[in-house]
Image: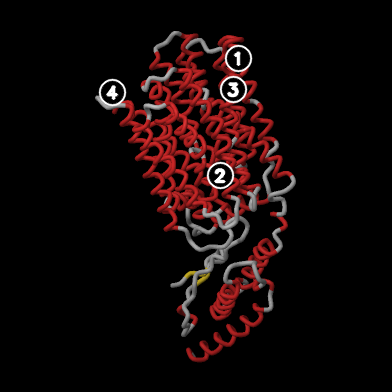
Amino acid sequence: MDADMTSHFVQSNNVDNKEHLERPCSDKGRLSSNEKVCKKESVLEALLGEKEISGSTSDLKERRSIENDDDEVEPQFSDLDSGWAWVVLAASFLSFALLGGSMYSVGIIHNALLERFQASVGLTSWVGALHTGILSLGGLLSTAMVDRFSCRTAIIFSGIFYTGGYLATAFVPCIEAALFTCGIVAGIGGALGYTASMVVVGFNFKRHRNLALGVSMSGVGVGVCVFAPVMQMAKEFYGYTGFFICCAGMQINLVTFGMLCFPSSLENYSHTMRLRDSGRLPQDTNVFKRRVMPYVNVMLNKGIVCLCFSMFLYCAATFLLYLHLPTYITTKGFSENQAAFLISLSGILTVVGRFLTGLLANIQHCNEIVLYAGSMTIVSIATIVYPFVSRHYVSHLMYVICLGLFLGSCYVVLTTVSLKFVGINYIATAIGLEFMLGGVGAIVGPVIAGILVDNGGTYDQSVIVAGGCILMAAVCGAFSVCFVAKRTDVNTTFELRVLELPRNVENTSSLGKIDPSGNAYLQ
């Protein structure tokens, strides 16, 4: 009887293979290893026939026909890199300008609060610390809103929280209330918008994704160069209350920019695939676990873990540098005006550097991981050498030029690098997790440098420590290449999740079973 079953199975397998070779699923360029996938499908159908599972074969065929239609025709992805995608890119660029201007103008906000309430510097500093800390640490908050609703919703709520926080700060009676309104509420607004403004570009571009990310993220530099001076003038001209009302008026534009970011077909597709992945868990799994497990898998991805450590070290070092760089320049005998000019120059060059990085990464066959780790390596080498040549103003100028051109390059390609590990369905989760670890580094780095200086160290030593951290960040980023899996195009192609069947099949009883969601499992 076993021999008859094996003969029947082999015959049906051969017949199905011939049929599948004539079907569209073997069309060139649709999926990697198409013939191999078709063979697996034919074996699966034979398994269903032998196990006499009524209705399962037709259900599976119907399921595959829907999935194959999406994969072959891809009408829902025709809006990528064209039409409204460019409007979304402009909205993302302007959103980053507002977010960057607010994030890097925390010193102006600090001075305004200090003059108004005459509180201690330490207590007032908590407002700025919460403002920037929550913006970075709240990456997963933005991820949750993007995955549950859309990037559009997250950016709109970013503008609402920002506006409400700044308006309330304009009329608060004490610094303790400002801790909540400006530190926490406005910080949540920044957290919601920053991740979503990056992810929405990835959902609207495929062929020009790196270039689009370079353009959008250069908005941070534009915000530092344009909005920061505007905020300073508003503070001097309108006073405390008028200053925060003007800040609220600027940030409410995030609502307008968010309204323009309609979900693309790729974003809708990703949302559907996440719901599908949640439904793949066993039926007796509780709702919470069904929702959370796919995200836990992203967090445990080895490539994403490498990128998280990389961002932690990188942000710890770069925030240390920008916090102490003006003081460091003045300790070398140069004026505060010269130091301010160098910092402004780095902001301008950040725009150029991020755009050029996107342009370079958009070149075919460009390895984004090499670009990610390579830009960090250049910054680390320049930072380690910097203290040894800092007696000359030209050396400061050369270092700031290098810092401006390469400091933001890793952020431009971070989305594309993350796509090598998790795919487009969970890119928001990956980016949010990486930004959260970066936020932890942004808090830890300056504190460690301060402790080092207070305990007899020098600013030269803290700069060298920063250079070492950036070098380790580059190593972590480069090491992630070991975990890049060979896969189909993560942007639009659906992967058939059928387990590899044994090459030598002696009888069908050893193959396994089909779960309610249509997956094959080996016993």
Q: CA distance from mark 1 to mark 4?
A: 36 Å
* Closer mark to the observer between disc 3 and disc 4: 4
Q: In the image, 384: left or right of 490?
A: left
Label 1 CA crowd tier, 10 Å (few <14, some 14–19, many 20+): some
Instruction: Identify the residue shown where x is 51% and y is 23%.
Output: 341
Which numbered disc covers residue 357?
Answer: 2
Q: How is the image coloured?
A: secondary structure
Q: CA distance from mark 1 to mark 3?
A: 18 Å
Q: Which residue is mark 1?
A: 234
| Mark 3 element type | helix
Q: CA distance from mark 4 to mark 2?
A: 38 Å
* CB within 8 Å, label 1 to label 3: no
Q: Earlier in the sequence, mark 4 or mark 2?
A: 2
Q: Earlier in the sequence, mark 1 or mark 2?
A: 1
Q: Earlier in the sequence, mark 3 or mark 4?
A: 3
Q: Which residue, as the protein is rendered here, is positioned at the far right?
A: 83
* CB within 8 Å, label 4 to label 2: no
* Closer mark to the observer between disc 4 and disc 2: 2
Residue 399 lies in what quarter of the image? Answer: top left
Q: Earlier in the sequence, mark 1 or mark 3?
A: 3
Q: Which residue is mark 3?
A: 164
Q: Which residue is mark 4?
A: 454
* CB within 8 Å, label 1 to label 4: no
- Identity of the amino acid at label 4? Asp
* Closer mark to the observer between disc 1 and disc 2: 2
- Identity of the amino acid at label 2? Thr
| Mark 2 element type | helix
